[in-house]
Amino acid sequence: MAFLTDNCTLRIYNSELINSCLPFDCGNKDLNDYFINDAINYNSELLGKSYCFVLDIDPSIIVCAFTLSNDSIKTNHLPNARKKKINVSIPRAKQMRTYPAVLIGRLGIAMPFRKVESELKRTSHQLMDFIKSWFIDNSYKTGCRFIVVDAYNAERPLKFYKNNGFNQIFSTEEQEKEYTGLLLENELVTRLMYFDLILLSPLYN
């Protein structure tokens, strides 16, 4: 049984929903602040659209929330080896300098669904599978080859995305700093990662 799809309902994360639900707490101060104070502004400025799953038995409880926006992978801004890694599954005649992508700007699972490690993995992996399925659906209106994310540069989030099939765009932190314009002595707070949606396409399998 899929917990999210069988026991929850997808809703647009807007002011009306926030006012009808209990405060969302995913255990991360930065993410909590975003969903409380910034998500609605991002939506109104057309910078990102947020969604959430609420419990069917109690729609005032937000199980998880996430924000999506348009993005791209620009291979002409990558080292040759990383460019080849991204291009490897794309037919040569269709290889481009820029590939359409969707960005997962924020993603959080509410604390009550994180207490048991297996529950965290089960719920969060289902959410990631749901997001992936959106962009290979026939009803999706534009092309989207990749999902990208700026994952927190910490063991747990990086492991989560790796376990969900994401790869790091840059092979090392030093390389990522160089190509994103950061000084080598600066802390790298996030790591750029991507998932190739062609792996889920019916035409590919």
Image: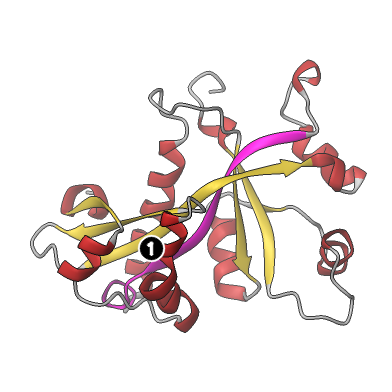
Establish if 30 lies above or below 160: below
> In the image as oriented, which residue stretches furthest toward the left?
57
Q: Which residue is mark 1?
A: 40
Q: Is residue 113 magenta?
A: yes
Crowding around mark 1 (Cα neighbors within 10 Å: few <14, some 14 to 19, many 20+) is some
Q: Residue at x 46, y 42 (%)?
A: 132
Q: Total marks drawn?
A: 1
Q: Residue at x 19, y 70 (%)?
A: 19
> In the image as oriented, which residue stretches furthest toward the front?
45
Q: Is residue 2 visible?
A: no
Tell me where the magenta segment starts and ends, as one range. 98-114
Q: Is residue 66 magenta?
A: no
Residue 199, image x, y percentages:
57, 33
Residue 7, image x, y percentages:
16, 54
Question: On the image, which quarter does residue 37 sit in?
Answer: bottom left
> Taking 75 as reference, is 8 left or right?
left
Under circle 1, the secondary element is helix
What amino acid type is highlighted by mark number 1? Ile
Residue 102, image x, y percentages:
55, 44
Please name the predominant secondary structure of the magenta segment in the image. strand
Question: On the image, which quarter does residue 118 sit in?
Answer: bottom left
Q: Is residue 205 visible?
A: yes
Residue 152, image x, y percentages:
61, 71
Q: Nearer the viewer, residue 167 or 27?
A: 27
